[in-house]
Image: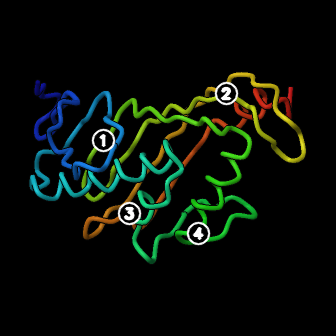
Amino acid sequence: MITKILPGLVILAACGQALAATPEEQLPLPKNIVADMSIPEAQRQEMALAARRYYAFWHTGESRYMQAALANDFMDRNLPAGRPQGPEGPLFASKNFRAAVPDLQLEVEEMLLVGDRVIGRLHFSGHYSGSFHGRQGDGRKVDFIATDIYRIAQGKITDNWHLEDNLTLLQQLGVVK
């Protein structure tokens, strides 16, 4: 299903259009996709694939997806304190977060392809059954949202701007009230 929303922009139902992946890859499918149709089809597919591979990394914790998605010179444009810059940063973040929430899952609510950017509205969930800053989890549910903006060049994510609902997350972990 394709629905035009503005001249040159369409909403693609998550039916696989512009979402090519290799058969061995289990990549999250966005519930909604908005694409700038002035972007050539091959470039849209390339952009969507890079984003979906990175989403798969956050969904599974498997570094092969991150390695397939990120450029060697990847930059986190709002790097949290204590996190390494470059591709090592997401590995560090995922490892530490999965220590607290081992069953972390990601749903992609919406993916927008505009210019050389992919914007994702993301929904994370799981259970705090691990350890976070020395505190042992009690199995309580964790459920929060995030928004990521990726700049894509030559089929790889070169830059990432992200905003997580850390207040909700920290409240659910019992760190703040």
Which percent across, then down, holds residue 97? 68, 47
Going from the N terminus, do you reach mark 2 or mark 1 first? 1
Q: Secondary structure at mark 2?
A: strand
* Mark 2 → mark 3, Cα distance in angstroms: 27 Å
Is disc 2 surrounded by few (<14), some (14 to 19) or many (20+) residues within 10 Å? Answer: many
Residue corresponding to mark 1: 112
Marker count (numbered) = 4
Q: In the structure shown, which secondary structural element does the residue marked by tag 4 occupy?
A: helix
Which residue lies most toward the front here? 24
Q: Which badge, 2 or 3, is on the more N-terminal residue?
A: 2
Disc 1: CA contacts within 10 A as few (<14), some (14-19) or many (>=20): many
Position of residue 151 in the picture relative to residue 138 (left or right): left
Name the front one of labels 2 and 3. 2
At horizontal 22% and vertical 48% (from top left) the residue drawn is: 23
Question: Does the residue at mark 2 contact the one at mark 4 (Cβ under 8 Å)?
Answer: no
Q: Which mark is residue 142?
A: 2
Give the spatial CA distance, label 2 vs label 1.
26 Å
Give the quarter of the figure containing the N terminus. top left
Q: Which label number is shown at residue 157?
A: 3
Q: Position of residue 14 (x, y in %)?
A: 23, 30
Q: Is residue 149 above or below residue 128?
A: below
**Which residue in the protein does label 4 denote?**
88
Which comes sooner in the sequence, label 1 or label 4? 4
Q: Position of residue 58 (x, y in %)?
A: 51, 47
Q: Residue at x 15, y 34 (%)?
A: 10
Specify the quadrant of the image occupied by residue 84.
Answer: bottom right
Mark nearer the viewer, 2 or 1: 2
